[in-house]
Structures are given as structure tokens and as C-alpha cells.
Image (cartoon, rainbow, N blue to C red):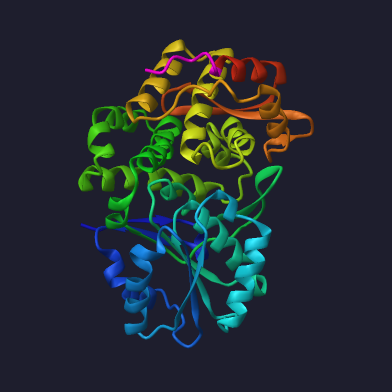
Amino acid sequence: MMRELTVDLGERSYPIYIGEGLLQDASSFFTKHNISKKSPLLIVTDTNIAPKYLEALQKELVQGGFKAEAAVVPSGESTKSLAMLEKLVGQALEAGLDRKSTIVALGGGVVGDLAGFLAASYMRGIKFIQIPTTILAHDSSVGGKVAVNHSLAKNIIGAFHQPEFVLYDLNTLQSLPAREIKAGLSEVVKHGLIWDESFVSWCEVNSEKLLALDAEALGYALYVGCGVKAAVVSQDERENGLRAILNLGHTIGHALEAVAGYNELLHGEAISIGMVGSAKLGMRYGATEEVYIRTKNVLAKLGLPVRLPEHFDVEAIMSAMMHDKKFLEGTMTFIVPTAIGKVEIESNVSVDWVREIVEQLKQEDEL
């Protein structure tokens, strides 16, 4: 069964296709969306994904009449750099890409962000397609945020550039390592925590099925998660207000990633710890302790970390938060839960409160 959603952005609206075996019919989706067969397209993927799916995708597209070139980058967050972007621009030029060409992101969030920013900046913007191969990418592949990192801050060099469509083949998730499955589920449950209490309950009940990659449970979870993201983006494409709620856990989480050099913690693991911190902060704004306890419990049930490793330096984390895009005019902005399924955007958050919470995260009990 294929599920379909729409990100409603007027003339720039696009669909999200979710189902099993979709890569085997990729050329029909490309044709349906008027991807040029005269201009070459460039598939950007990484060293983990290329051996699994690149050859089959290229073959399928070539048989469908497309000129499919490929560029393979190293896996990992450190690949999202200006140096790698420059290298990809060179490969795009060598492949003959023009204004009618398309960039195809085949991989997880890193590949999607990097390839998307390549598409946004190459010849001032060309088409691109998201083909996510991780659970985590159900979030990053939707909404058009594309970027590379700077050594001082994550995603600080970027743009808004919407894809033509998102093609989510659930079969590609079967090869994910257990740790990446858990990390990906962090962003899945986040969508429930900000929007839909009943979905959080569903995740609690179906945690074992999700961890086992049960196709029906996973398909439903990604459909709901993508649906929340699509609904929010449709109302606030460029994060002028509502879209900020999607950053639950990210202010602390991004700082943890930066301090860890983008290699000790996976993105979803850092966001999980950040969401526990946000729930603790929520109690300062009137949320009940139950919201904090339940947030922590559902994350732990999905095998995610809920405490900060002892060796992380609190002042280094605070410094990293000061470089975050959500640090504005000397104040800190946090997304804090008021209930399960409801959050508020709090500006002018006390830096001292945040420091206390980061310190407390080292004392959290693993469940």
C-alpha cells in the first residue's frame, strides 16, 4: 500500500509518497513530475547508501530515458561543509548540469541537506528530489530546509528550497543499524509531542513494532510524522512563527552535536536529550511534572538516551547555544511543552535557567 500526503504551498505544493518498493518504479514518478530527460540529473548519495541502492536507481532511471549521473560523498555530519559543496559543484559542472537539470538526494538527512543546498545554489536554483533512506530523514526531507554546517554552528549556511516530491521507499529502512533506527524514531515521536497526544500513546503501545521495523507500523508512523510536518510547513514555510515548534529539543540538541564534534551523538540522540531538557524547562512555565515524566518515558521506551553524558562541558554547551539561529538579540528562545501534544514558543528564556537544566541533565536516571 502506498500512502500519499501533500505539502500545500500553492503553486509550489508537492507530494510525499510512502510505501514499499517505490524505488523499483522511480522513473515513473520522475516522468509524472516532468523531470527533464534532455538535461542530465545528478544523484547525490553517500558511501553507506551507494553500495545498497545507487546502481539499481541509476539503472531504473536510465531505462526510463533519464541521463543519471552520480556523486558519492563520505557519510557523516562532517560532510555537510562548504568544502564538500564546492566539490559537488565541480562534479555537477563536469556532468553537464544546466538550469533544467535536477539534483536527487538519495540518503539520510545529511545527504538531503547537502544535496538540497547544492540544488538551491547551483545556477541560482534548480529542481531537486528527496529520496530518504533513514527514519530520521522523514523530518528533514520535508519542508525545504537545506544547509551546510560551520565549525561553530549547525545548519547556519542554508536556504529554503522545496523539493519536487519526496519518494519514501520503506524497504530502504530495513538495512538500518539498530542505533540509527532508534535515533530516527526520536523525530517521529517529536511530532506527536508537539501536535498529537494520541500519536504519542500509539508510539508507546507500538514501540516494539517500530524498533523491529514492522512495515505496517512504520508506514503509519512515518505517514503521521510527515503529515504533522506537512501541516506545519503549509502554514508557515519560512519559520516566521508556527514552524518554530518543530524545533522542540533542538536548541539543546544542536549544541550537544556541536560540542561532540558531530560524531559522538547521532542527531536523534541529541534531540532526545534536548526534548527531556525542554520538558524540564516546561515545568518552569507551568507544565505538570507528568509531562516531563511521560516525555522521558516514551523516549526511553524507544531506546533513546534521556541524560547528558557526564564528560560534556556545560559551559561549552552554553557557548554553542549562543551561536544557534534561535539565539536572537541576546535572548534564548525555546519550544516548551505545556501538555503532551501541545507546545509554546517562549522567548526571553533565562540563560541561568537553561544552564541549570543542562547541569541537571547529567543527573537524569536512565529508565
Q: Is residue 250 left or right of residue 156?
A: left
Report the front residue among 101 and 208: 208
Residue 361, image x and y in percent? 54, 18
Residue occupying the far right of the picture: 329
Numbered circles on residues, count: 0
Question: In the figure, is residue 110 to the left or right of 358?
Answer: left
Indicate whether 291 appears above or below 21.
above
Say if the magenta span includes residue 312.
no
Q: Position of residue 115 (x, y in %)?
A: 54, 63
The magenta stretch spans residue 364 = yes
Is 72 on the left-hand or right-hand side of 210? right
Which is nearer the eye, 282 or 319?
A: 319
Report whether residue 343 is seen. Answer: no
Q: Which residues are magenta?
A: 361-367
Residue at the spot 41% in from the left edge and 13% down from the top edge: 290
Q: Quadrant of the N terminus?
A: bottom left
Q: Main secondary structure of the magenta part?
A: loop
